[in-house]
Amino acid sequence: MIAYLPEIYPDELVYSWFCRYYIHSGCITHKMALQEILYKRCNNPSKEFIGHLNPDMLEKISSLYNIDDLILNHTMFPQYARFVPLEQRKIALFHIGHDFCDVHHLFPVLPRSDADRFLKYCPLCAVEDRKEYGEAYWHRKHQIRNMMVCVKHKCKLLNSRVEAKDEQDFTLSPAELEIGKVEPEIIENPLQLAYHEYLTTVFDTPIDFENNIPVAAALYHHMTRTKYMKTSGKTRYTKQLADDMKAHYEAIGLSHIASMHQIQRVLLGNRFDFNVICQIAFFLGMPADELTAPVLTATQIEQEQDSHYMKGKAPIDWNAYDDELAPMLEQIARDIYEGAASEIGRPERVSEKVIYRELELPKHRLDNLSKCKAIFEKYTESYAENWARKLIWAYRKLEAESNGKPFYWSDIREISGVKKKNIDKILPFLIKYTDSEMAQAIISKIGI
């Protein structure tokens, strides 16, 4: 029974909260703390969301906080769900809070750039936290993709040593132990400060769960007042917009600037990436409330939808498209193949269906993208090969966690998901992915 949970601090990530629980609870090891938090030890929590909680922890948290409020105010939900269609927004909130669904099934979570690889922190926030609360913690807004500045202190955010994504070897890394005393670097570039203040304002604005006004429509009607839209409203000068945005954000020193293809997909209502949308809106001088709470009539929404006649006629630069998608596909495919995209770290099979879903691509689009196609084929494998890799992963995981205690086929079966009836198909591939000694050890556990 969970007897005590520390108070969650303002704008603190749930992951940070669990890290502090690990310290304050008296748990000797990470595994002990995770066992008290999780439904199963093999269910990793999420650094950006909550994870699959065990009944005791869920009951304790629910007695202190409303789960929906926890998701909205202490996870990265506003970054991924704010601009998706209303029904998808509602479904995502329910599943994250009530059946702990993998967020990759709810909305696209794109690979991280090098600039967003680690959890970030503000040295001055850490000083204030220690003075007010007695310890530093991981701030949620600092972890927004492309966020480079703490707007409160106008201070450059620094990278910690803690990986931001949910790695297979999950550890609870409290900010208090990771953040040392560092001299802050104050940002004086007014454009840089203004952009990050805008990003923060949009992120902090309460999410609308009542109105279903597409963000593409809001952007469209603001663009009609700019030089990037023909007076007829039927033509967007997207290349000029992309070129001007690139020059503008290079002056700010932004690490990842939206490409023309990304901008096109947002304007056509096919993409809902928080950073791309904020870059477009800020550059166009769109007030934050027009973006987060647009007021449009049904006629105005229809006008934007009617303007999509040019969608099918817009020429596609397949080489540029291929170059842009290839690194994203590589990261997604690798994470799936190696298990980083799985809640429990289990290697999965890379399928076209998953790739199309994660990259929001139309069916058969890979046929026109040679680099992407080659990457996909590199990770393609038969079901039997994938089952073999899952068995090896499960065996190694159980061996590492058993502390010398025996484990059995039923244990391997439970976390690998592999059925015994498929063993004959799997056996030829065991030796391909491991040595003969481990292959024989797995076979002996199966009992054949």
Image (cartoon, helix red, strand yellow):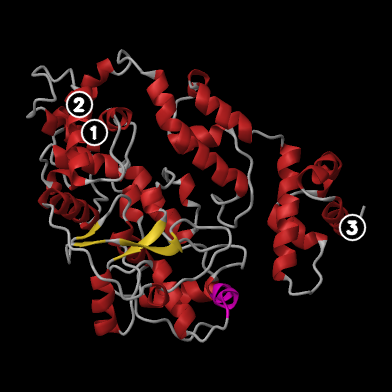
Q: Main SS of the magenta segment?
A: helix
Q: Which residue is mark 1?
A: 216
Residue visible at 49% across and 71% down in the picture? 172
Residue visible at 30% across and 45% down in the picture? 255
Q: Is residue 35 magenta?
A: yes
Q: Which residue is mark 2?
A: 304
Tag on residue 309? Answer: none
Q: Element type at marker 2?
A: helix
- Dot 3 or dot 2: first in sequence order is 2
Residue 293 percent across, percent down from the top left: 17, 47
- Amino acid type of the residue tagged 1 in the rendering: Ala
- Amino acid type of the residue tagged 2 in the rendering: Glu
Start-end of magenta stretch: 29-36
Q: Which residue is mark 3?
A: 444
Label pair 3/2, CB-CB below 8 angstroms: no
Q: Is residue 361 magenta?
A: no
Say which of 395 and 270 sits in front: 395
Residue visible at 28% across and 54% down in the picture? 147
Quadrant of the image for the N terminus? Answer: bottom right
Residue 415 percent across, percent down from the top left: 69, 58
- Amino acid type of the residue tagged 3 in the rendering: Ser
- Dot 1 or dot 2: first in sequence order is 1
Q: Element type at marker 3?
A: helix
Does the rendering let one see residue 214? no
